[in-house]
Amino acid sequence: MCYNDQARDQQGGQGVPGEVARNLQAVRERIARAASRAGRPAGDITLVVVTKTQPVERIAEAIAAGAQHIGENYVQEAREKHARIQTPVTWHLIGHLQSNKAGQAAALFDVIHTLDSLQLAERVSRRAVAAGREIEVLVEVNIAGEPTKHGVSPGEAIPLLEAISGLPGLRPAGLMGMAPFTDNPEDARPHFRRLRALWETIPAPCRRHLSMGMSGDFEVAVEEGATMVRVGTAIFGRRPPKS
């Protein structure tokens, strides 16, 4: 199933006061300009608002401003927020999924961006079937070969996606990747370009989403073909350091 609320994601939030609402609108406008430079409709890009460590009140402000897609890094944190947020939104898991959290993830999330093994996919599949759910899933690709990051190699991505396509309860939908952290967004461009090229080799039924780009480089990601961008800091500000 493809989402039909992407254009609404770009248009909501008019007249809502507050820093979060203003920042969210500014991000939408930056996405629209980047899409225009690439000759793409802005409505083709889904903005996933990353709410890691954010209090429910700040998330509620983003939702009131029109955010429809909420991205969380940790299952337990998402579980606590999910219980308190009653507004219907699409929940995305964008952080690494540990196998022992597969059951909780299958119950909470509508989209999981970070599958990186068939064994993990099988666990999520079993739990999704038991819960009577169907979850969109992406294969995470370690596009720069960084040893500190999760994800499969580019050569492993398509075979894994094809294997997942045979599992009940899962709807394979594309790829997710992160460029190396850098102060220059242009440094991410070749990595995004390679991931887009890989994504284009996926059979059409599984080629719906290309999740790439975060606060520091999402405009480059849009120019290079992202259909989903994951933005937190540009909306909520920098997270306070851990105590």
Image (spheres, rainbow, N blue to C red):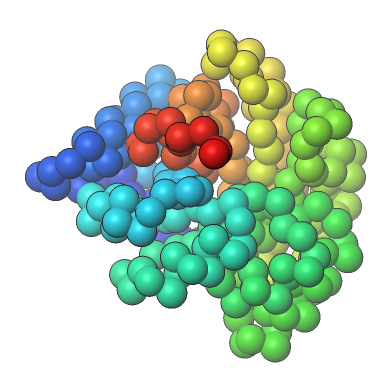
Inspect this view and state whether residue 222 appears.
no
- Residue 213 is drawn in which quadrant? top right
Position of residue 230 relative to residue 120, above or below, is above
For image coordinates 59% across by 43% down, the residue present is 211
Q: Residue at x 36, y 38 (%)?
A: 236
Residue pushed farthest front?
243
> Residue 153: x, y in percent?
86, 38
Above or below 210: residue 233:
above
Quadrant, the C terminus: top right
Horizontally, is 241 left or right of 22 in the view?
A: right
Percent of width and height locating residue 89 = 39, 65
x and y percent of residue 122 in the render?
A: 83, 71
Q: Give the quadrant of the N terminus.
A: bottom right
Image point (54%, 61%), residue name:
77
Q: How many marks?
A: 0
Residue 36 relative to residue 97: left or right: left
Question: Is residue 225 left or right of 166 when viewed as pictured?
Answer: left
When the figure is inspected, residue 130 is found, relative to residue 31, above or below; the finding is: below
In the depicted view, which residue is nearer to us: 40 or 48?
A: 48
Closer-to-camera residue (201/74): 74
128, 169: nearer the viewer: 128
Residue 184 appears in the figure: yes
In the picture, measured across the screen, residue 149 lies left or right of residue 211, that is right
Residue 178 horizontal/vertical position (percent): 66, 33
Q: Residue 187's image quarter?
A: top right
**Residue at point 88% right, 52% down?**
159
Most foreground residue, 89 or 208: 89
